[in-house]
Image: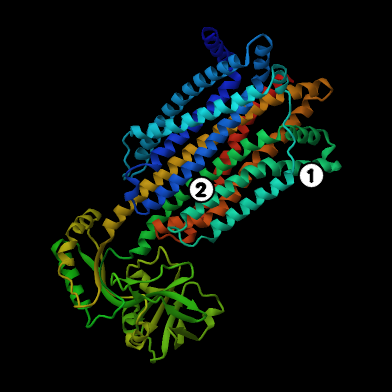
Amino acid sequence: MSKVLFPLALANLRKNYRLYGPFALAFVTSVALLYNFITLAFNPSLSSLRGGPSIVTVLALGMIILAITGAAIIWYANGFVFKQRTKEYGLYGILGLERRHLLSLMWIEITVFSGLSALVGLATGVLVNRLILALYQRIMDLSLELDTKFQPQYLWTCLTLIFLLYLSLIVINSWRIFRLKPLQLVRESRRGEKKGRFTWLSALIGLGLMGYGYYLALSIENALAAIMVFFVAVLLVTAGTYLLFQAGSITLLKFLKGRKSYYYKPENFISTSNLIFRMRKNAVGLATICLLSTMALVTLSAGISLFLGTESAINRFYPTDYSLSLNYSYQMPSGDASQKLDEQLSQFGQKYQLDLVDMDHTHYIQVIGKFHGHDFRGQEVHVDSETGMVKHDNPDKESATLNIISLADYNHLSGQNYQLAANQVLWFDNQASAAERKNQEIQVAGQNFQIQEHLASNLLETKAPDFTMNFVDHRTLLVVSDLSVIQDKLAGTNFISRYTVYANSQASHDQQLASAEHLEEVLKTVHVDEGIPVNASFLVKAEIHDSYMQMIGSIFFIGIFLAAIFLLGLALTIYYKQISEGLEDAERFEILQKVGLTKQAIHKTIRKQITVVFFAPIILALFHLAGAYHMMSLILRLISAMRLEDILIPTIGTALAITLFYFLVFLITSRSYEKIVSSKS
């Protein structure tokens, strides 16, 4: 019997190319997307990047979401193809083929189809991977810190997932054939979807899942500690999206059907009835398009924001070309180390011909804490009894950084000549409201100070590097008459006393980069007070810039790469949906024309139906982007000290660009739908 079934299966695949063509497109796209995601998620070089462990975790969790989405696309396509072929299977049964023969025929068809589609999908995935990498290295003047060699283990991982998907198709189709008799199979292709019970309840559950997912994503404070929570939020929103399109759309359509003024118009009557008729399968495709749109929006927004915002972030983070610092943690040093630091940096510049200019120094105290009303209190620190290490809580969204500088140093840096009494201060707060700028009093660690003037800017941030910018938003500056008036109040808190010498250089970028190889010469000679924890740091902006941009180039590549494959998947999924919907609707519109509906009315109905159906996903995807924005900004600011506007503006621009791309894809692919429907009407 196998000698008969195998040629018959091949003939069936060739004969039904109009059905299996779009199905193959969906299968190939899903496999290619999955392969490319796996190559990134398991890239051995990714963990070494700044923020790499977080990126690896997000990609690994995202791979699960993508696998679920890809499976949904293929199950949806398989369901459509099987329904169109049930009449054919039924006729085979009536002509004498037993159920086991039908099962064998189906197994052969699925095996041949899945095997060929998987091979083409993997080949496409490898080709797209190399093509995007080549284009990136050709266009972008950035080196890539990722391992770009072909890794065979990626294929095995992908093949394992494909095999599981293949088994699921076998089980699903076998069950459909097993439970139906030949006559039932013949009638199956014309049977509409069953009306779901309690659709309003499912719609409410979908909204509830999405709402709770949004709440989790928006309430996250720490990017490192909350990636798993964010993953749960993504799963909830994913499930809510499918439920909302499946049950929520039906609830809405039934509501519109109940409105006589809307429903009893030819174009509304036909399009609404048509959508209700095939409600469930339609919903799965739309939800998948929505999720692919969301993935493209998030990855492209993140990649562009990071690339455009990092240059300005580096300039804010490291305002001068060279800075040499002594950082005393939790205690005040004895004496003044700035003079020796001046000499060391000056000698270093002369030795390597760096033409140092604008050399200066400052001494300030940096405290991380929180405001309690108008009272700033530093984080308490304690010594671990077992390890002897000093510990403190991690900063959160309510934390603030207080930089304290003496009046003498501030006048020296600013060129001003302020005069302050012992209880008077100059004050800057980057988050102060207009009303708060009128306050005449501030408290630090319970000590009251009179504010002589509210400063317009934080001068210190333009001179010395600040290592808290990427995790603390609230930033303040306190200028006191002398550091001695406040240092006793800081005992037992999380503070650093920092001496910093800084300068700019007129040497070339390459010269500055070469000098970074000799930093140890200076670090070995810096002054250290006995018994006081101290960390010496010597920063060369040129080295940091190149290191950052190399890392950012790799992450930007990941963002652009993922966005490209998501957009490709989105376009192909929309195209497949238009083709499959056209094939399913063609016969119905042919019947409508036979009973008197004009071609003009048919085209008007078609346009209205596909417009409503295909613009719902992108609208919901924009809501998903808004829900993910907070978490996305936390992760980006963990990688690079970016301002919120550095993320918001590119995100808005990306949303507009992808919406335009979606609209163009819709216009192009909708012609295929109209062509199929019109050809039979």
Q: Where does residue 17 sit, x and y in percent of width and height?
A: 58, 17
Q: Which mark is residue 255?
A: 1
Q: Quadrant of residue 476?
A: bottom left
Which of the image's four quarters has the N terminus?
top right
Q: Give the vertical position of 342 relative to 192 (above or below).
A: below
Q: Where does residue 289 sit, x and y in percent of width and height?
A: 59, 38
Instruction: Kindly identify the amino acid type of the residue bearing the numbered disc 1.
Output: Phe
Disc 1 crowd, CA 10 A, few/some/many (<14, 14-19, 20+): few
Q: Give the vertical position of 13 relative to 618 (above or below).
A: above
Disc 2 crowd, CA 10 A, few/some/many (<14, 14-19, 20+): many
Q: Which residue is located at x 22 percent, y 53 percent?
A: 510
Mark in the foreground, 2 or 1: 1
Q: Is residue 520 left or right of residue 73?
A: left
Q: How is the image coloured?
A: rainbow
Q: Give the vertical position of 644 relative to 25 (above or below).
A: below
What secondary structure is marked by label 2?
helix
Which is more toward the observer, 232 or 643? Answer: 232
Q: Where does residue 401 sit, x and y in percent of width and height?
A: 41, 73
Residue 652 visible, this orientation:
no
Q: Which residue is located at x 53 percent, y 55 percent?
A: 629
Which is more toward the observer, 298 or 91? Answer: 91
Which is more toward the observer, 646 or 594? Answer: 594
Of labels 2 and 1, earlier in sequence is 1
Q: Quadrant of residue 152?
A: top left
Q: Where does residue 195 sit, x and y in percent of width and height?
A: 75, 36
Q: CA distance from mark 2 to mark 1?
A: 33 Å
Instruction: Kindly identify the amino acid type of the residue bearing the numbered disc 2.
Output: Val
Q: Which residue is located at x 51 percent, y 53 percent?
A: 230
Q: Which mark is residue 298?
A: 2
